[in-house]
Structures are given as C-alpha cells and as structure tokens.
Amino acid sequence: MSGASSSTWRNWAGNVTARPVREVSPASAAELADAVRRAAEDGLKVKAVGTGHSFTTAAATDGVLIRPDLLTGIREIDRTAMTVTVEAGTPLKRLNAVLAREGLSLTNMGDIMEQTVAGATSTGTHGTGRDSASIAAQITALELITADGSLLKCSAKENPEVFAAARIGLGALGVVSAITLAVEPEFLLTAREEPMAFDKVTSEFDALHAENEHFEFYWFPHTGNCNTKRNNRSAGPAAPPGRVSGWIEDEFMSNGLFQVVCSLGRAVPATIPAIAKVSSRALSARTYTDIPYRVFTSPRRVRFVEMEYAVPREAVVAALREVRALVDRSNLRVSFPVEVRTAPADDIALSTASGRDTAYIAVHMYKGTPYQAYFTAVERIMAVHAGRPHWGKVHTRDAEYFAEAYPRFGEFTALRDRLDPDRLFGNAYLRRVLGD
C-alpha cells in the first residue's frame, strides 16, 4: 500500500477542501480492508475519494482518505454473462476504451467520463435515456469493504438487501472495492444536434422524449434559445465528426471560446445577456454517427459549480418554465446553459429516479462566480415539484427532507445502522443528508 502522507485535498471545482490525517492508496481489496481496520483501531473516520467531480463534501474527511489511484484495472470480462468486473478506482474513460477494444459497450453513460467507476455510481451519475437508466442501474454485482474490515459480496442473489441500496451508497455503507457492470455488443449511435426555440422544445417535450432513445436539451438563460440532442441507435455506417469541424464545435466553441465568454461574464456581469443571445445562436445543426462513448461523452474543460434536481418527468416543463421566469424577472446573470435530461424509474433505494420516471434540471455557474442566490431560488422551485437533488451536486437538503422525498429512505438508513453502527464512514455531509 502506497504512502500514508497527508496534504490538502481539493475537488475538481475547487469549492471543497479537506485536510485528512493521512491518505492511503491501496492496490487491492486486501490492502483496502487493512486500511479500514487500521483507521478503526486509530479512532479515525474513513472516506474514499474518486476524481473529485462531486460539488458536495460527500468525500471530505479529517480522518483517513482512501485514494483510488492504484485500485484500478479490468478484473474480468465475462462474455457469457455479458458483464465486466472492474476495480473501484478505474476511471470511466479507461473502462470505455477497454470495452471499445473488446467490441463491447455500456448501454448508457453520463456526459463526462473523468470519474472513477465507484465515484460515479455511488453518487448516482447518469446520462439521459427513455428506457436506459443511470450507470448504477447497470451494476449486476459489487464488493464492499464494511466497517469491520470484511469483504461483502452483493448482487440480486447474494445479500440482495445490501445490493438494493449499495449501488448508490454515498460511501455510507462501506468502501466499494470492485463493481460488475452489464455490457452489450458495441453499437452505433447517430447524434442529431439542432437549435430549437424554448417554446417549441417545451411544448413538444413529451413527443421528443417518446420518439428518441436519448433526448436532452440545453436552454441558454436570458434567451428563448435551446440546443437539442437526440441520440438513437443506428445501423451505420460510422460517420464521426470531421477532425476540423469536430474540433471547432467540441473544443474551440464548447471549451476555448466558452471559457473566454465565461471569464468576460464573471468580470462584467452586465454583458452576459447580450453574449448569451449571440453564443446561443453560434452552434449549428449537425448529425454524426459513432460508437457510444464518443457520442454520449464530451470534454468539459471549463470549470463550474453545479446543482441538479430530479423531478417527476411530467413536472419538468412546468419547473423549467418557472426557472426561466425567475431568471427573467431577477437581476441574476447566468452565463451557463441549463441542462435537461431524463431517466426511467429504477429500483435503487436512493436513486434520484427511484420508483418514478424522472427528468433532471441542472443549473451551473462559472467557477469563481457567486452562485448561492441563483441556486437557492432554483432549489425553492424544485422543492415544490418534489425534487430530489443529485447526491454529488450542490444542495441544502437534509435527512428530514429526504425521508419524505424517498419512499425507501428508512430502508437505507436501517441498513446503514446494521453495517456501520459506529459511523466509521461518516462525515458532516452524511450527518446532514442521512441523520445520525
């Protein structure tokens, strides 16, 4: 096991810091279990951290910080069961690349692939899908190091009550050491990106959702403009974006130029509405066909802070229209688009889509820009619509709220009481969202 050094840990957005007593980088489940036992003996809390893409303090600790750097790699690809088993710290981008080489793919994924597999699934990371759900919903089995240092295997057949909760476990039930995911033969997706007026996309949302396997759109605040994206399976042939046109759209426009625009908006907020009207018209329609991870994911180099709420799918248009009205009547200046995605109901206790067809509204602010007034106002709207915040994104909700929002909340907290009665894996965030 590598080093017990300690330093200040920061998340990707820079809005969370922690100073653990020590950091450890176990290279196996056995070393991970040893680190957990040793922390318990020393009276220290334990938290595992991924790549820091959460905006909450979910992974922050002043005890022992488990780093994922060495707990990586593909353990097994089972072509009979059509599964892949990976070490918990494996980055999604590495998993996607290996699966592509093997002619395999996940069914659905989020739009960023920098996270570790365990970090992404433990917080409920998702993409958009009419029929296919979050990454965690594609888990078929997982291994958990529990508070006594033992390794607990769980699946639908083995420790099913743990499996029902631990797929999105918030780090509260133990430290995940390995995850088995369902895969399928690699397929092609055709992406159709197209500007569309806000009024049109909201009035036709139900049809756009029903007609497309993966539909999402971005609304540009201070404008009536949106950009839509429809991803559907294709017989091919592959026709990826041209190297030059792809670079212009994905790097120059979406990262380089957007960085400049955001920096200007932060320095001179009064310019944001005018810039938004221009930039929201800059993206043109395009269609391309490629393997899934190249269509689902895209680079995100402009740093931001984000809040995302899940609402019942039938409530999303009303909630979004309220967000637009809020921005229009306020002196808020918002340079980042608002993202809208969907997910089918799933059976994971603390999934934001648990038991209901869901749509997501994500609001962002450029790093270094005050975001509290905007997020607080949006959060009030979401609460009226029975919103459930993403576990890894900024929110102010607590256990009392979640006990109402999640029908199976008590099931999760009872399991936590059984697996971690002394709260070895506790921290301030879990105290707030799960209670003591």
Image (cartoon, grey):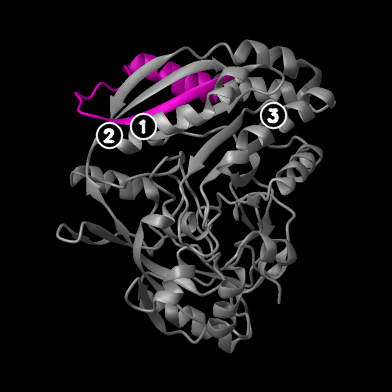
Q: Is residue 282 above or below residue 109?
A: above
Q: Is residue 412 above or below residue 134?
A: below
Task: Check the picture and name the quadrant holding the C terminus.
Answer: bottom right
Magenta region, residue range: 226-255
Report the side of 407 relative to 272 (left or right): left
For the residue carrying disc 1, how many other residues have a C-alpha within 10 Å: few (<14), some (14-19), or many (20+)? Answer: some
Report the side of 388 relative to 160 (left or right): right
Q: Is residue 108 visible?
A: yes
Whether pointer 3 and pointer 2 mark residues with C-beta atoms closer than 8 Å, the reply is no
Q: Which mark is residue 321?
A: 3
Distance from disc 3 to disc 2, alpha carbons, whole Å, reads 34 Å
Q: Which mark is residue 291?
A: 2
Q: Residue 232: say if magenta.
A: yes
Q: Which mark is residue 239?
A: none
Task: Check the picture and name the quadrant holding the N terminus.
Answer: bottom left
Looking at the rendered structure, the kind of residue marked 3 is Arg
Looking at the rendered structure, the kind of residue marked 1 is Val
For the residue carrying disc 2, how many other residues have a C-alpha within 10 Å: few (<14), some (14-19), or many (20+)? Answer: many
Q: Secondary structure at mark 2?
A: loop
- Residue appearing at x 69%, y 63% in the figure: 404
Q: Residue 237: say if magenta.
A: yes
Distance from disc 3 to disc 1, alpha carbons, whole Å, reads 28 Å
For the residue carrying disc 3, how many other residues have a C-alpha within 10 Å: few (<14), some (14-19), or many (20+)? Answer: some
Q: Position of residue 23 (x, y in %)?
A: 55, 69
Q: Is residue 237 above or below residue 18?
A: above
| Residue marked by disc 1 | 295
Give the mark nearest the N terminus, 3 or 2: 2
- Residue appearing at x 49%, y 57% in the figure: 119
| Residue closest to the eye, 386 or 378 | 386
Looking at the rendered structure, the kind of residue marked 2 is Ile
Q: Secondary structure at mark 3?
A: helix
| Residue closest to the eye, 128 or 176 | 128
